[in-house]
Amino acid sequence: MSFFRAHYFHRNILPSRQISFLQPPKIALGKSNSHFLRLSQLKSFTKSVSTSSSSLQEGINPIFTAYPFITFFSSLMLTFENGNQPKVEISHSKYLSRSEMIDQLKNIFNPHEDQSFYHIIYGINGIGKSTLVKTASKEVGQGVIYVEIPASVYDLNEAFAKALNMSPNKFTFTNRIARSFLEGSKEPELKQYLEAIKYGAEVYKRKHGKPPVIIYDNVDHLVAKHSKILDLLQNDAKKSADDKKYITVFVSGKNSTFNKMYSNKHIWPHAKKLVMEIGELSKEESMNYLVNKRGIKTIKEGRIDTTEAEKLYELVGGNIRDLSNVADKFNASFEGKFNNNLY
Ligand SMILES: Nc1ncnc2c1ncn2[C@@H]1O[C@H](COP(=O)(O)OP(=O)(O)OP(=O)(O)O)[C@@H](O)[C@H]1O
Ligand SMILES: [Mg+2]
């Protein structure tokens, strides 16, 4: 650790009695080849990373866990180990299983050792992309990190912090140490998160023999005003694919975003990009959703009548958000809550 860094910790983070904790040679970083040193230190402790925090603690010399940056990396590695398990906010009774799509996504999220592609998942707004991607990434779990790109770029750092299970408050003790550790004080914070992902991915790949997967959902939010950030993420995706470190998956709901990303030959010059398109539900799937998941049916003379569900499908087609909205309205008007004219 450089003098500057120790000084920085001392003045800004640690009370003076704690500064001695930062001195042991095992974790002191020299200026030369610091990248190698850091990785070798990570390697030794992450050999013992396992899926529960108690076994994680067991495998590590307790003295190391006393250091905040070791805690930071053990937490990072746990996130890679388990995946970050994004929440799907649909109740079980209303959830329509789309197993074919889920299987295709699970294939993407389970790359083999030498895979070096980057992916774009495309489908118009409301078609069910996020739900499918989150469900598949939860089912694969291990090695899958889902990042939800927020509507405002000012929330981007928070989104990365959330995805990596770091504290959203960038001024917390651990994150400040981590930021210094990643030598990123001069870099924009986003680059530091990408560095953290790179480190985590290297350790993960060494342990599991396959690259982890990073998913960026809602990349459309970056296109209008912040295409430089999208370029940065695309560059990073290309580099990490070329180096076989991790696989990046971009999820887009706009044709313009898709075209911009796909045809960006400057950044993605070769044919390593794979595209998966998510389409509308078929009539059969839509009817299954309306009738069995949303209860839009009546019993007439002992038989199930699905005329109303059929009318709703004719009205909006197979976009699941539209189907969900129209089912909400229908059920609300049926219950007498609103007097909507649906057709
Ligand atoms: N499998 C499903 N079962 C039940 N409802 C679903 C399912 N998938 C999506 N929905 C409903 O459709 C809505 C839109 O889905 P989702 O957010 O996944 O679409 P999206 O394609 O990601 O949309 P956007 O392009 O706006 O990001 C959800 O909020 C939910 O109400
Ligand atoms: Mg979405």
Image: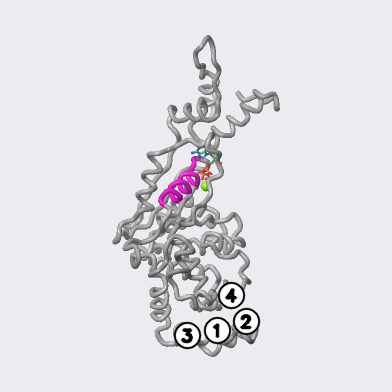
Give the Cα separation between the discs numbered 4 and 1: 16 Å
Q: In the rendering, which numbered label is found on residue 28?
A: 3
Residue 203 highlighted magenta (yes or no):
no
Q: Position of residue 259 (x, y in %)?
A: 44, 51
Q: Secondary structure at mark 1?
A: helix
Residue labelled with disc 4: 176
Q: Quadrant of the C terminus?
A: top right
Label 3, secondary structure: give it.
Answer: loop
307 or 94, which lies in front? 94
Q: Which residues are magenta?
A: 127-140
- Left or right of 331 on screen, residue 98: left
Q: Amino acid at mark 1?
A: Phe
Q: CA distance from mark 1 to mark 2?
A: 10 Å
Q: How many marks?
A: 4
Residue 165 pos. (x, y %): 54, 62
Q: Position of residue 340 (x, y in %)?
A: 67, 26
